[in-house]
Image (cartoon, helix red, strand yellow):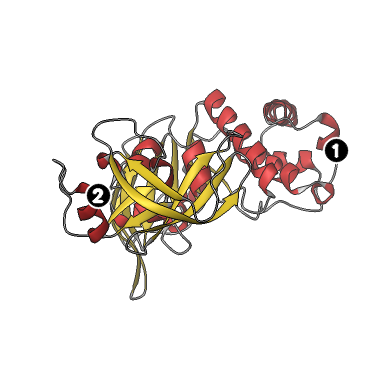
Amino acid sequence: MIKFDNIEISYGDFVAIENLNLEIEEGEFFTFLGPSGCGKSTTLRALVGFLTPSKGSIFVDSKDITHTEPEQRGIGIVFQSYALFPTMTVYENIAFGLKVKKVSPDIIKAKVYEVAKKIKISEQQLTRNVSELSGGQQQRVALARALVLEPTILCLDEPLSNLDAKLRIDLRKELKRLQKDLKITTLYVTHDQEEALTLSDRIAVFNNGYVEQVGSPKEIYNASKTQFVCEFIGDSNVLSAEVLQEISHGTDYHYQDKEGFIRLERLRFTRESERDLSCQAVVSDYEFEGILIKYTAKLANGDTIFVLEKNDGISNREIGDRITLYLNPDDVLQY
C-alpha cells in the first residue's frame, strides 16, 4: 500500500535519510523504531507531506504522492504534543477538520459521536474544554480528531511519550484494539522498544538515517541481523571470543574468533538439551524485581554477565554462590 522508493531527505549538506526503500502493507501496524535523531520522524513527515524528499518517490496504492499537498493525501496524524485547541471543547476539537471541509452540521455531529464512542470519549467529556482534561484524555481527543476524517492511513508520532508508565500501557492496549477494529493502516514512531514489540505487526529499526532491519517483533528480537539492532532491542550479554572458545571447546560447535551476544533470558540454570554449552560463574550481586530476579555474575576470566530467573519462591542464590549456566549454542549471535 505504501512504498518508499529510493528516498533521500537532506537539509543542506546534512543527509537525514539516505536511499530508503520500504513497503508497508494495507491494514498493517508498522513501527519506525530507533533512537532520537535517527530519521524515523523525518520519514513519517515526508509521508504526510510536511517535507519533500530531495530524491526518490513515495507511493500510496501505486499513486505517486511525493508532491501532493498534505490535505489531499488522506493521511491522519497524531503528534506527540497533541496540537489541540485549548480554548475549544472536545467536540469542537474533533469536529474542526470536518468544519474546514464544510461538512453539514448534522453529518459532523453523527461522525463526532460515532468516533467518540469508538475511542471511549463520553458525551459529558465532549462538552468540556480540552484544557480541563488529563494527558490520557487529551491523547484520545487527538486520536479522535484524526480518525473522524476517515483517513486511509493513520500516522502516530511518539503519541504516548508524555504519559506516565501505567497510562502508556493502558493506551497501548486501546490503540491496538482500535487499529484491529478499524483495520486502518497505521505507522507508529517510537524510541520505546517495548512499545514497538507489543504493538507492531512489523518493525523497521532506524539508525543514523538507515534502516538496519525490517521484520516482525519476533524476528527483530530473536534474530537481530546487526549488532546495533541486537544492542538496541532488549538486553544482551556480550561474550568475549575467549569465553566462546572455552565453552565450545571439545564440542562440535565452533564460533568465529570474535565476541558474541546472547539475550539475558537465554542463559539458564538447568540443562535442557545435550547440545547445551555450559560455563561456570560466581554470583556477585542481584536485583529483586518481583516477578524476576536479575543476577550479576562473574565468569572465570573476570567478565561480568547478567542472568534472569523467575521468582518461584524456591530459588535462593546468594552473593558468592558458584553457579553453572547453560545456553543453546544457536542463541549466540555474532556479527
Q: Residue 247 versus residue 191: which sits nearer the camera?
A: 247
Q: Residue 315 versus residue 245: which sits nearer the camera?
A: 315
Measured along the vertical axis of the image, is residue 152 above or below residue 240? above
Name the residue beneath numbered marker 1.
127
The residue depicted at 29 percent of the width and 38 percent of the height is 328
Count of labels shown?
A: 2
Q: Please identify the quarter of the rendering in which residue 104 is found.
A: top right
Residue type at mark 2 is Ile
The residue depicted at 56 percent of the width and 45 percent of the height is 293
The residue depicted at 32 percent of the width and 44 percent of the height is 214
The answer to whether residue 1 is left or right of residue 294 is: left
Determine if residue 154 is in view: no
SS assignment at label 1: loop
Q: Please identify the quarter of the rendering in which residue 17 is found.
A: bottom left
Name the residue beneath numbered marker 2.
247
The answer to whether residue 297 is left or right of residue 144 is: left
Number of residues whose C-alpha sits closer than 10 Å to that of mark 1, classed few (under 14), some (14–19) or many (20 or more): few
